[in-house]
Structure formats: C-alpha cells, structure tokens
Image: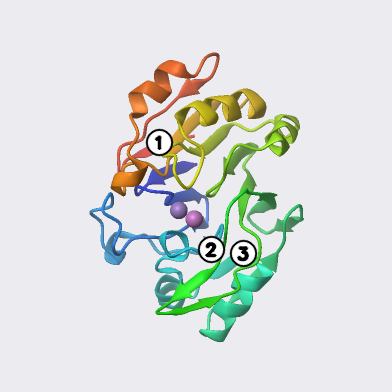
Amino acid sequence: MKLTYYGHSVFVIQNNNFTGIVDPFIKGNSSCSQSLDDIPKLTHIFVTHGHGDHIGDTVELAKRDDALVICNAEIGRYLANQGVKVHTMHIGGRTKFDFGKIKMTPALHGSGIQIGDKTYDGGNPGGFLFYLNDKVIYHAGDTGLAMDMKLLADENVDIALLPIGGNYTMDIDDAVKAVEFIQPNLVVPMHYNTFDVIKADVNEFKEKVKNTEVKIINFSDSIEV
Ligand code: NI
Ligand code: MN
C-alpha cells in the first residue's frame, strides 16, 4: 500500500485496484506544485468537510475519473447537484466497501461550503478511518483536540494523519496530546505552512512526540505502508 502527500490535507492512498484521495485541494494550494494532471486516476474521493481547502477540486476530479465521492449527507447533496456520484455516510457510521471498510469520525470544526458570496450547508465536519489491507489509517480532517480521540486507541490505528498548524485546528502541542490519546504506530503531520496563519515547525512536532514514530512526508513524496 502506498501513501502520497500533496501538501495541506491532501493524501492519495493506493492499494491494489483502489486509488483514493482525501480532501483534493490542488489548485490554489501553495504547498502543492502539482496540477490535476499529476493526480493518478482515482476510484474514490473522500471529503472531510465543506471548506474550500478540503472540498477543493472534488467536482472536477470526480467527473474526470468517474470516481465515487464518500462524504457526509449534506456535502453529498451539494455534490450530487453538481452531477457527481456520491456515497453518503455520517459521523460514527462504519461501512464495508469492496476495497475495505470506512468509518466517519467526529471533528471539532465547521463545514460550510462557500461558493462566491453564498454559503451552503456542509453538515458536520469529520474525519475518516480507513481499514485497508490489515492496516488502519486515520485522517483527522480539520479538528481541535477532542476527548473523543481517546476512543480511537481501540481502533489500533497504524498511521494517524493529524493537523498541526493551529489557528483553525490543533497546534503542535495539542497534536502531541492527540497522539497520546490515539496511540498510533506512526504519525504524519499535515495542515501546516500552506497559509501564513498555519505556519508550524514540523521538527518541533517531531521532537515533542514521545513513544510514537513521526514521519514527515515531503510534499508529493510517497511512503510504503
Ligand atoms: Ni476547515
Ligand atoms: Mn482546512
């Protein structure tokens, strides 16, 4: 299984015939030098919440690849109106797909979908647990630190993808606490340095995390998991 980071909260997970992207914010992502043409052919797109830096290029990519978008019911309604194929779930729901299982997790954040000067209801923000090939990957989405994360220790998370940039989400110190709650085997920091207001020193995060390996994935690099 391969995990590729495109900066911000954008990850591509490839496992056998499954190629899923999470929060495909490619155009306008200052930490991603890639264009949509560099994104591999997708089978699935996962959207954690409705903000522009997460819903991103979902519509264009979903139509390009005829990919199925998995997201909450409110974002799903918005995307279906754009002609996109969706499978809607909600917080706490766990579903078996042909590629593995998915569970939606809560996030402390907002989810409004801003289009021009209109805001559409994006429901509740969330994150995803991916159960793939005997591995469990947790993508937290945008979230503050939450006691609910203690429940994730029971999910035997192999890789936790956690925001560290502060201002809109957990900062470094809160993400360190989240790692203690979740107890993953490996943690990958995300959602930092894209904008001035979320600048964070990843090496400081790496130094502060104890008892868990921290893997800093450079933008557009991959790791085998
Ligand atoms: Ni957000
Ligand atoms: Mn964000």
* Distance between the alpha carbons at the discs numbered 1 and 2: 20 Å
Looking at this view, is 54 or 123 the one in front? 123
x%, y% of residue 74?
65, 72
Which mark identifies residue 44?
2
Q: Amino acid at mark 3?
A: Cys
Give me the residue at 43% from left, 49% from top.
9
Relative horizontal placement of residue 96, taking residue 113 as reference (left or right):
right
Give me the residue at 62% from left, 42% from top.
133
Q: Is mark 3 within 8 Å of ligand 1?
A: no
x%, y% of residue 96?
74, 56
Q: Amino acid at mark 2?
A: His
Give me the residue at 42% from left, 28% from top.
215
Q: Is mark 1 within 8 Å of ligand 2?
A: no
* Mark 1, residue position: 223
Q: Nearer the viewer, mark 3 or mark 1?
A: 3
x%, y% of residue 112?
55, 67
The numbered mark, 1 or 2, whose residue comes first in the sequence reads: 2
Q: Quadrant of residue 70?
A: bottom right
Colour style of the rendered protein structure: rainbow
Q: Nearer the viewer, mark 2 or mark 3?
A: 3
Looking at this view, is 35 or 122 the one in front? 122
The numbered mark, 2 or 3, whose residue comes first in the sequence reads: 2
Residue at the extreme top: 211
Q: Is 69 rendered above or below residue 199?
A: below
* Mark 3, residue position: 71
The numbered mark, 3 or 1, whose residue comes first in the sequence reads: 3
